[in-house]
Image (tube, rainbow, N blue to C red):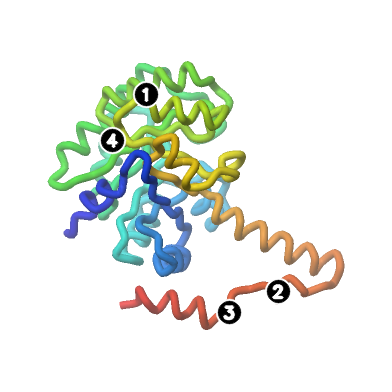
Amino acid sequence: MHDPGPAFRALHHPGNPFVLANAWDIGSARMLAAMGAQALATSSSAYAFTLGLPDGGITRDQALAHAQDLVAATPLPVSGDFEDGFGEDPDTVAETVRLAAEIGLAGISIEDNPAPPGAPYDRALAIERIRAASAAARALPRDFVLVARADGILNGHYGMEEATARLHGFDEAGADCLYAPIPPSFEDLEKICAMTDKPVNALASGPFASYTRDDFARIGVARISLGGALARAAQRRVMDAFSEIMEDGSFAMLKKTVPGAKVDEMLRQYMV
């Protein structure tokens, strides 16, 4: 099997971030690749939506099958948004790493809490989970980029002090990249970048969507994820257009679409 790990790892340069484009199906993956994406990622929330499920509602088997579809969709490396590794036990997380590598993923991210609204795992357990994931990744026959996430700020369970302590622990446990989605301020994100030599991932969503790639580069970010934001942007267009149809009887927003021929052209680039 082709090893996507080295090419993916090589994209991670603190101060020169690449955009990790989160797709939610084969079509969106191929469109993003045709538009110049350097790497793709799954989005647990965006994929769950395609199944009519809330974020956190998919199983490991579903996540793996979906990720495998995206791996096959384009030549780009793909990282998996694999929630908490689909189990509390460190051995389960390690097995998730091995399964992710088997289907051709270039890496995965592991959160420190079960699916919302679950409270975060105890810090010691959270670190042990990353240690097990790192050991599994290093035992693989190919390269694999492991991202450790401290999600308590995003989910309202803890603040910067606890996030920093967890990130330090994840760093020492062998994570390749560190990630605390949506810290309290941009300055806090800069502090996270300054506390480690490892690449730091930032999420361009919510208040952080107001910053530019140059802004993220200035503070030392290595990677910018879009999470479910692109999918939610598409959902916003559906809501706006259909609301106008239902409330006003107007179809005007349907004139503001991409030509089908243009989409077909992008998709054909990656058809076998």
Mark 3 secondary-structure assignment: loop
Q: Amino acid at mark 4?
A: Asp
Residue holding disc 1: 195
Going from N to C along the chain, the mark reached first, 4 or 2, is 4
Residue marked by disc 3: 259
At 58% across and 79% down in the image, what residue appears? 259
**Callout 2: SS:** helix
Q: Earlier in the sequence, mark 4 or mark 1?
A: 4
**Residue 8 point in image, percent of width and height:** 28, 50
Q: Residue under circle 4? A: 176
Q: Would you say the residues marked 3 and 4 are in contact, meaning their CB atoms lie under 8 Å apart? A: no
At numbered mark 1, what does the secondary structure look like: helix, strand or loop?
A: loop
Q: Nearer the viewer, residue 104 or 198?
A: 198
Q: Residues within 10 Å of mark 4 (few under 14, many from 20)?
A: many
SS class of the residue under badge 4? Answer: loop
Say which quarter of the image contains residue 37.
Answer: bottom left
**Label located before the other in sequence (3 or 4):** 4
Residue occupying the point 44% across, 75% down: 266
Residue identifier under label 2: 254
Rounded to the nearest whole Å, what is the CA distance between mark 4 and mark 1?
14 Å
Query: Which residue type does callout 2 highlight?
Result: Leu
Most extreme residue toward the bottom, as rendered? 261
CA gap, disc 3 to disc 4? 41 Å
Of labels 1 and 2, earlier in sequence is 1
Q: How dense is the environment of label 2, judged by Cα within 10 Å: few (below 14), some, or many (20 and up)?
A: few
Tell me the amino acid under the disc marked 3. Answer: Pro
Q: How many marks are shown on the rendered structure?
A: 4
Distance in Å between CA atoms under marks 3 and 2: 11 Å
Q: Can residue 16 be seen at all in this image of the molecule?
A: yes
Query: Where's residue 224, x and y in %?
Result: 44, 45
